[in-house]
Amino acid sequence: MQHGRGLVLDESSYRSYVPSFVAPGRVNLMGDHTDYNDGFVLPLAIDRACTVRVTPPSTNGAITAISHQLDGRVSVPVDGSAEPATGEPPWGRFVAGVVRALTERGITVEPADLDVDTTVPVGSGCRRARHWPSP
């Protein structure tokens, strides 16, 4: 089985392999007068991060996600038909938006279960990188 960037796994090793993707938290260092000085800021990674672990799907035809910090379970069809703006719970709108964006670009989204965990304090004003890295 070909997986990710050239990683080849047989069926037995795939069962024990759990890919994880990490997006560092960040802060923007802003000085005075950024509003009329082209808005320049200096983004810095911090010692906090969002981690997504991907496992084989428990539901056919869907991306299912849970969060360790936020309530609810997200289930999004892999065909991109879910409307991101109305997804519930609200944090699941990110998942639906990514699936929609990928399918609109002709990228096939495979079913998977996502386990989302973060050390970035929820509601702190810190942000994690807004991308879902792909294998």
Image (tube, rainbow, N blue to C red):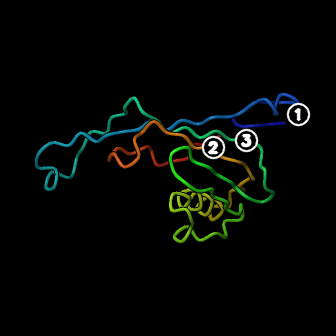
Image height check: is 131 above or below 72?
Answer: above
The three-letter amino acid code for the residue at tag 2 is: Asp
Residue on which the image places disc 1: 11
Mark 1 secondary-structure assignment: helix
Q: Looking at the picture, how far across and down is residue 7, in whole percent?
A: 75, 30
Pick whichever of labels 2 and 1 is earlier in the sequence. 1
Residue on which the image places disc 2: 115
Quadrant location of the N terminus in the rendered image: top right
Pick whichever of labels 3 and 2 is earlier in the sequence. 3
The three-letter amino acid code for the residue at tag 1 is: Glu
Q: Is residue 119 left or right of residue 105?
A: left
Q: Residue at x 56, y 59 (%)?
A: 92
The three-letter amino acid code for the residue at tag 3 is: Thr
Residue 89 or residue 83, whichever sits in front: 89
Mark 3–mark 2 contact, CB under 8 Å? yes
Residue on which the image places disc 3: 55
